[in-house]
Image (tube, rainbow, N blue to C red):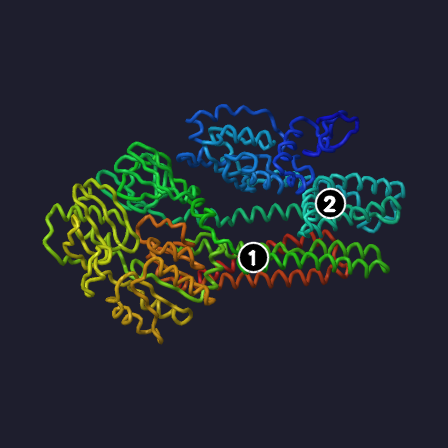
């Protein structure tokens, strides 16, 4: 029940001052019915942990909140412009939430499914202040979600012009304002304290000195309560969670400077160090601003998106050719075959679509699409060739989100991440002990020196540089990999590459050059119509053998197809016109055939085997050199789904390898997956290199899965990276560069540690002023970032340009 009280208190939800008669619920006071409603909603859903993560977590969310009308979101045309994806009952939307400001906000917004059962999943991008929501349209709607967010005081900013996408979230104006206030106070406090620095302070009248001291305290108040509030809030939240973060020592330094300076001024025992406090905050805030700008200038995430290696088959004026997906424009006609990804929202113009949206929704059940129906980017066609008209320009960032879908994430932290986390925790605790020890040592001799030693140690010793080393070094490496046509999913893959000791190659499409093939037909004579039917079915597959046969026959592929189904590692079947065609291995035909021809592609027309195609793909020209170099540093294995006819040719190519290379033939996709598992169980750290079609399971299982791409739509969420076939010869250099990049990170760790040891050694002596420490702390981070970036660039140019 709601009761009234006369006690004036701060609102439990937003922290604002309550009116004389606040609303009181469960011994908590609220300034308005809105805050009370949010509390009751969270309480009823057993989500009051929101209030334990931060004091008054709704403070930022209530700011600028006004009554919103979201009825317009029920308009299908309006909703369609806002949704990223909508198919059947599943829809995805990204909303800009200006009120996101702390960990409590993130926790609440990522637990929306506990409030509305129709919300399946929500994830916050803190820097962009966005929340990505996946929901079931049968149980909730976009309007209800927007209204729920507004009710929670997280009203989304929705404009049909997508104004929030045009805003620049990278500019932290509050940080700029705080730095400005700190600079104003610092400059004036320095001016007021000038007589003390110029040694004629004793000639200033005592009344003036006391007045200047009071003025310094007055100027220090906004510095303490406004400019440093982020440090206090972060430290308090960490301590409430029984943790010590890197802000705690800085906060203690700020408090000690203010308390001791205030005591000296009021007791008339000294001029205090208020100017040092102002300078400390000014340089800390400017250092943080500079770090943000430096990070944005080296944004490797943006760079690797721009190098994303996806091509698509364009059709213009009756001619088909491959082009970069980034060139796709509204109105273009694209051709998508079996197992290829649809790169942009498009309307189906020809053929029947059977779309697998598992990369978007996690649901593997295919969706049937008819002509003139909309198909969303990220769907994969299963079945025959389809033609589509692009209705939206290609969105690189959307496909990158699909590739980083958590369905395909490998959830384990890298050793560098573990070292960084553990070191930061131990480092912060030890810094506190050193600062306290230095203060206790100097206290009996010189209070001023004790204060300088205590605050300087807390400020100058910071693990920020260590935390920044890996992201910058590995992120820079990521860009250089992309420039040489080796595209990795994220920076952590670079570290995994440096750790591998075993490399497993798939043969077909990886060791062989699928762009060149010798094809011969052995069997009964095929009519012109039968050749067209075979070519039409073969063109539905992106398997290298099927592509070679389609190119060899070189017939029109415009016949009607139905019930096309591809069986990975076996073959493809379907109705072409009135004929039932099957292409594949001998076992796929269900007949006992001679051993000499088991590795060929057999053709069955209307359940009668008519013969087989003999397909020979030449091995890559630089294969022997690559294997010879890799075998000297790694364990190598070759897996193939083919028969053993190629063993002799491979052994001849691998003749330069001293002990030969293990080769396993007749390997199904399941066998390849099991082989990778057996390596991992034996303690090996493996990389799988395959064509991304039949090897999806093995690629996903391997510690590093790399799909080799020719000219097809090679988007594969199962892989950690995509290697352009033209760069296959650089594989040994890529692995060498990965090790060097990790070496740069370790060098950065050492450099940061040396810096901190030297800085602390000066600080504990009391000879380093807090202002100088505040200048040196961000400079250390910037210098480590510069070293990581420049050294990684040097290694890249030295190794990859050879």
Q: Which residue is mark 2?
A: 278
Dot 2 surroundings within 10 Å: few (below 14), some, or many (20 or more)?
many
- Left or right of 365 in this view: 223: right
The percent position of residue 774, horizontal first and vertical second, equals 69, 51
Is residue 321 positioned above or below 783 on the image?
Answer: above
Asked if 599 appears above or below 405 in the picture, the reply is: below
The one nearer the camera, 723 or 201, is: 723
Q: Residue at x 25, y 50 (%)?
A: 572
- SS type, badge 1: helix
| Quadrant of image for the C terminus | bottom left
In the picture of the structure, the residue carrying the numbered disc 1 is 417
Q: On screen, 681 above or below 360?
A: below
Which of 427 and 200 lies nearest the eye of the viewer?
A: 427
Q: Is residue 552 left or right of residue 60?
A: left
Counting residues from the N terminus, which is met first, the one under dot 2 or under dot 1?
2
Report the side of 173 relative to 122 (left or right): right
Give yes or no for contact between labels 2 and 1 (Cβ–Cβ under 8 Å).
Answer: no
The answer to whether one can see residue 114 in this image is yes
């Amino acid at each position: 029940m709601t009761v009234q009280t006369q006690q004036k208190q701060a609102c439990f939800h937003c922290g604002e001052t309550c009116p004389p008669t606040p609303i009181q619920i469960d011994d908590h006071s609220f300034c308005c019915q809105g805050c009370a409603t949010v509390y009751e909603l969270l309480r009823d859903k057993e989500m009051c942990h929101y209030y334990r993560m931060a004091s008054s977590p709704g403070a930022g969310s209530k700011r600028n909140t006004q009554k919103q009308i979201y009825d317009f979101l029920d308009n299908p045309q309006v909703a369609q412009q806002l949704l990223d994806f909508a198919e059947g009952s599943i829809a995805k939307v990204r909303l800009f939430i200006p009120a996101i400001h702390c960990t409590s906000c993130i926790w609440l917004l990522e637990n929306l499914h506990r409030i509305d059962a129709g919300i399946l999943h929500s994830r916050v991008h803190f820097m962009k202040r966005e929340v990505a929501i996946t929901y079931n349209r049968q149980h909730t709607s976009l309007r209800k979600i927007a209204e729920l967010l507004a009710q929670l005081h997280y009203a989304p900013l929705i404009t049909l012009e997508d104004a929030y996408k045009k805003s620049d979230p990278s500019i932290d104006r509050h940080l700029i304002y705080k730095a400005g206030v700190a600079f104003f106070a610092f400059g004036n406090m320095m001016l007021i304290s000038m007589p003390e620095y110029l040694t004629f302070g004793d000639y200033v009248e005592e009344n003036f000195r006391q007045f200047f001291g009071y003025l310094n305290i007055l100027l220090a108040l906004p510095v303490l309560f406004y400019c440093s509030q982020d440090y206090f809030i972060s430290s308090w939240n960490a301590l409430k969670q029984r943790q010590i973060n890197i802000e705690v020592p800085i906060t203690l330094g700020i408090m000690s400077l203010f308390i001791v300076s205030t005591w000296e001024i009021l007791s008339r025992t000294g001029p205090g160090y208020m100017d040092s406090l102002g300078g400390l905050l000014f340089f800390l805030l400017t250092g943080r601003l500079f770090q943000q700008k430096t990070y944005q200038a080296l944004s490797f995430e943006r760079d690797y998106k721009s190098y994303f290696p996806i091509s698509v088959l364009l059709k213009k004026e009756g001619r088909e050719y491959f082009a970069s997906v980034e060139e796709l424009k509204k109105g273009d006609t694209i051709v998508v075959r079996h197992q290829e990804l649809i790169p942009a929202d498009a309307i189906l113009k020809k053929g029947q679509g059977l779309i697998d949206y598992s990369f978007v929704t996690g649901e593997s059940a295919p969706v049937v699409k008819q002509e003139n129906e909309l198909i969303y980017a990220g769907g994969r066609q299963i079945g025959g060739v389809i033609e589509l008209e692009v209705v939206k320009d290609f969105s690189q960032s959307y496909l990158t989100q699909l590739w980083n879908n958590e369905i395909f994430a490998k959830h384990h932290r890298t050793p560098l991440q573990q070292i960084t986390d553990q070191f930061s925790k131990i480092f912060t605790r030890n810094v506190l002990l050193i600062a306290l020890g230095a203060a206790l040592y100097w206290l009996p001799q010189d209070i001023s020196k004790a204060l300088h030693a205590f605050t300087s140690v807390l400020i100058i010793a910071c693990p920020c540089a260590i935390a920044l080393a890996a992201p910058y070094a590995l992120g820079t490496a990521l860009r250089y990999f992309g420039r040489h046509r080796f595209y990795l999913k994220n920076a952590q893959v670079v570290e995994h590459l440096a750790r591998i000791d075993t490399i497993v190659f798939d043969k077909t499409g990886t060791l062989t050059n699928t762009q060149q093939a010798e094809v011969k037909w052995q069997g009964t004579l095929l009519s012109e119509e039968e050749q067209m039917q075979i070519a039409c079915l073969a063109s539905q597959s992106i398997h290298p053998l099927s592509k070679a046969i389609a190119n060899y026959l070189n017939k029109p592929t415009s016949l009607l197809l139905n019930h096309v189904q591809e069986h990975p590692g076996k073959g493809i079947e379907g109705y072409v016109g009135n004929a039932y065609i099957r292409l594949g291995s001998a076992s796929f035909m269900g007949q006992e055939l001679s051993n000499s021809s088991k590795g060929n592609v057999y053709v069955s027309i209307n359940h009668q085997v008519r013969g087989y195609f003999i397909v020979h793909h030449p091995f890559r020209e630089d294969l022997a050199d690559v294997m010879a170099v890799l075998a000297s540093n790694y364990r190598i294995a070759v897996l193939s789904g083919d028969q053993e006819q190629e063993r002799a040719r491979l052994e001849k190519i691998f003749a330069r390898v001293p002990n030969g290379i293990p080769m396993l033939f007749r390997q199904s996709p399941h066998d390849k997956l099991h082989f990778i598992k057996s390596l991992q169980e034996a303690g090996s750290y493996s990389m799988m290199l395959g064509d991304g079609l039949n090897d999806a399971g093995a690629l996903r299982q391997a510690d590093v899965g790399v799909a080799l791409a020719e000219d097809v739509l090679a988007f594969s969420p199962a892989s950690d990276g995509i290697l352009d076939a033209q760069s296959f010869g650089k594989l040994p250099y890529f692995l060498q560069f990965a090790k060097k990049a990790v070496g740069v990170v370790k060098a950065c760790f050492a450099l940061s540690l040396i810096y901190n040891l030297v800085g602390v050694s000066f600080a504990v002596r009391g000879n380093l002023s807090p202002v100088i420490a505040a200048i040196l702390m961000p400079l250390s981070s910037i210098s480590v970032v510069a070293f990581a970036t420049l050294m990684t660039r040097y290694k890249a140019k030295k190794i990859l340009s050879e």
